[in-house]
Image (cartoon, rainbow, N blue to C red):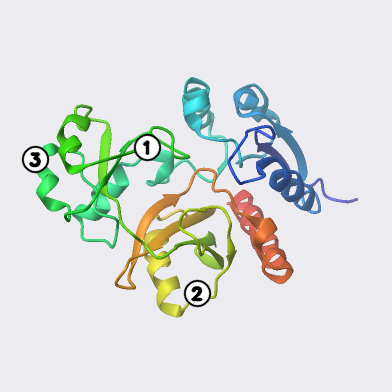
């Protein structure tokens, strides 16, 4: 008698209008591949609490910024923790799933992060720049982001939930993709003005070591993480974002062998997660 495949509730918003990223297409394709090993049902994030008890795990994927359904997400998180529901990625991440405080913490601890402060008294810790980036700690997908001059900086910091960073004339952005603690592939945007026009990137050992440092810091035993970095004018890498909640994977930009390896790694990760 054949064993019953594990049941996954795959949380996604197939209609979310992400700029330059076909969220729905990626999740349709990925969920279809997961059906080779699992029983998979798709649902919108606002329906997850009502449905999750009927599944072995909830897989949170391209569901858009939680700011658009913050109350429902908070309820989902609280209920999943209360019921002991298995959520992939696990809800123990310290990066984007917990807000942007980690950028402040990592910068203060000396990690290679874009300089970030949230207190006017700390502005002298930022390098002098032609412009500065002001964004909410709870922001995502560039929501609420704006650029200001040095004269506008202090008036822009009236909200304690605001972050400030120098605007860096970086060469390009690079994204590193991990399953558990294993590096899978890297993509980069050669044109800084076209963030999601990505191409395969041959990451050096030093590049991967840079990205792995943040994955190790986050200490998720299982899950998918995307480490976004920028190449500074001096050639060094600086962390822009550590996405550990629902990282878009840009699988349509990845060569077939790397895509197949990623899908195999995700299946193995999920099976290991469910076996614990």
Residue holding disc 2: 203
Residue with the most extreme right position: 1
- Disc assigned to residue 55: none
Picture quarter containing residue 132? top left
In the figure, is residue 119 to the left or right of 113?
left
In the figure, is residue 158 to the left or right of 217?
left
Residue with the most extreme bottom position: 205
Q: Is residue 222 visible?
A: no
Circle 3 packing at 10 Å, graded few (<14), some (14-19), many (20+), is few
Q: In terms of secondary structure, where does tag 3 sit?
A: helix
Residue at 44%, 57% in the rendered image: 228
Task: Depth check: give the residue in front, 48 or 175.
Answer: 175
- Disc assigned to residue 121: 3
Nearer-N-terminus badge (1/3):
3
Circle 1 packing at 10 Å, graded few (<14), some (14-19), many (20+), is some
- Where does the image place residue 211, in percent across and percent down from the top left? 42, 65
- Where does the image place residue 140, in percent across and percent down from the top left? 44, 38
Q: Is residue 274 above or below residue 232?
A: above
Measure the alpha-carbon separation of dots 3 and 2: 38 Å
Q: Are marks 3 and 2 in contact (CB under 8 Å)?
A: no
Nearer-N-terminus badge (2/1):
1
Measure the alpha-carbon separation of dots 2 and 1: 29 Å
Residue holding disc 1: 145
Q: Is residue 149 above or below residue 166?
A: above
Residue at 65%, 42% in the rendered image: 23
In the figure, is residue 237 to the left or right of 203?
left
- Where does the image place residue 46, in percent across and percent down from the top left? 60, 23
Q: Is residue 145 visible?
A: yes
Residue at 52%, 22% in the rendered image: 72
Q: In terms of secondary structure, where does tag 1 sit?
A: loop
Circle 2 packing at 10 Å, graded few (<14), some (14-19), many (20+), is some
Disc nearest the viewer among 1 and 3: 1
């Amino acid at each position: 008698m054949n064993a019953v495949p594990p049941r996954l509730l795959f949380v996604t918003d197939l209609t979310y209008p992400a700029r330059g990223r076909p969220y729905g297409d990626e999740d349709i394709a990925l969920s279809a591949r997961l059906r080779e090993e699992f029983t998979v049902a798709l649902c919108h994030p606002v329906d997850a609490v009502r449905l999750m008890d009927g599944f072995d795990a909830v897989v949170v994927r391209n569901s858009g910024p939680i700011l658009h359904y913050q109350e429902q997400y908070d309820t989902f998180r609280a209920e999943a923790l209360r019921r002991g529901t298995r959520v992939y990625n696990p809800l123990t991440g310290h990066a984007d799933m917990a807000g942007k405080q980690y950028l402040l913490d990592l910068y203060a601890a000396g990690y290679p992060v874009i300089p970030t402060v949230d207190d006017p008294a700390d502005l002298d810790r930022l390098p002098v720049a032609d412009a500065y980036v002001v964004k909410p700690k709870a922001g995502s997908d560039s929501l609420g982001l704006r650029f200001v001059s040095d004269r506008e900086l202090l008036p822009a910091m009236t909200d304690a939930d605001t972050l400030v960073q120098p605007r860096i004339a970086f060469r390009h952005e690079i994204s590193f993709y991990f399953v558990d603690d294993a590096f899978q592939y890297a993509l980069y945007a050669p044109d800084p003005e076209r963030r999601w026009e990505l191409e395969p990137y041959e990451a050096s050992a030093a590049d991967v070591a840079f990205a792995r440092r943040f994955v190790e810091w986050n200490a998720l035993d299982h899950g998918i993480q995307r480490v976004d970095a920028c190449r500074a004018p001096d050639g060094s890498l600086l962390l822009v974002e550590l996405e550990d909640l629902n990282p878009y994977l840009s699988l349509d930009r990845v060569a077939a062998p790397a895509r197949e390896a990623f899908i195999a790694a995700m299946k193995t990760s999920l099976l290991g997660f469910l076996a614990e």
